[in-house]
Amino acid sequence: MSRVGGVFLALALLAGGCGTSTAIADVTVGDCFDDPADVVVESLELIDCDRPHDNEVYANLAIEQSIFPGDDVLEAFAVDACLPALEAYAGVSYAESDLDYTFFVPTADTWNTTAERTVTCFLYAADLSKLSGSAKRSES
């Protein structure tokens, strides 16, 4: 059973007017950010992972379909695909970690108007405390 807290919808793919604002489609694995204020998210203010932060992107998963499959299908895909990606990124099983995850999924609108086909998985502390540093397993 998943502890996934919620789904954010990635609405727009072009960065807004703010200088440090990054479009959802342009975030990369390892990017860190604080919780967005809205459920429908157009862009994120990325912050240095060495500073306290709420979330860290750990996977961008491409969906190989041309026709929008529907919100339920995208959410099921994200729940199933983000979990093993989290375990690989953090280097610990989900059951043993103190991390939880959620994701951004494309909306029907962005799917059809911008051809965005990516689910972005991001992690956060299960107790909702701030993270410090990257959650990526260290490679020694």
Image (cartoon, grey):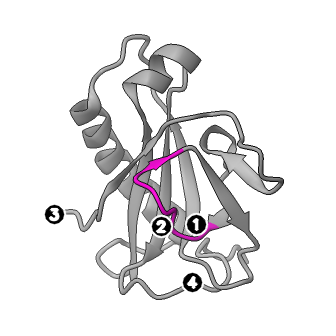
Sequence order check, earlier mark of 1 and 4 = 1
Residue lying at 62% horizontally and 34% vertically, measured from the top left = 13
Q: In this orientation, does residue 133 appear?
A: yes
Distance from the alpha carbon under mark 4 to that under mark 3: 24 Å
What secondary structure characterizes most of the magenta part?
Answer: loop
Judge left or right: residue 17 versus residue 24.
Answer: right
Q: Nearer the viewer, mark 2 or mark 3?
A: 2
Q: CA distance from mark 2 to mark 3?
A: 17 Å
Residue under label 1, please give it: 56
Q: Would you name the residue on which mark 4 appears?
A: 131
Say if the magenta span includes residue 83: no
Give the spatial CA distance, label 4 vs label 2.
10 Å
* Residue 35 on the magenta span: yes
- Rate crowding at label 2 as few (under 14), some (14 to 19) or many (20 or more) other CA atoms within 10 Å: many
Q: Identity of the amino acid at label 2? A: Leu
Disc 3 crowd, CA 10 A, few/some/many (<14, 14-19, 20+): few
Residue furthest left in the image: 1
Q: Residue furthest top?
A: 66
Is 104 placed above or below 45 here? above
The image position of residue 42, as x and y in percent, is 57, 43
Q: Residue at label 2? A: 123
Type of residue at label 1? Glu
* Magenta stretch bounds: 33-41
Give the residue pinned by disc 3: 1
Whichever of callouts 2 and 3 sits on the residue coming sooner in the sequence is 3
Give how far apart the Cα atoms at labels 1 and 3 are.
22 Å
Lower sequence index among marks 4 and 3: 3
Residue at x 30% of width, y 58% of height: 6
Which comes before the other along the chain, label 2 or label 1? Answer: 1
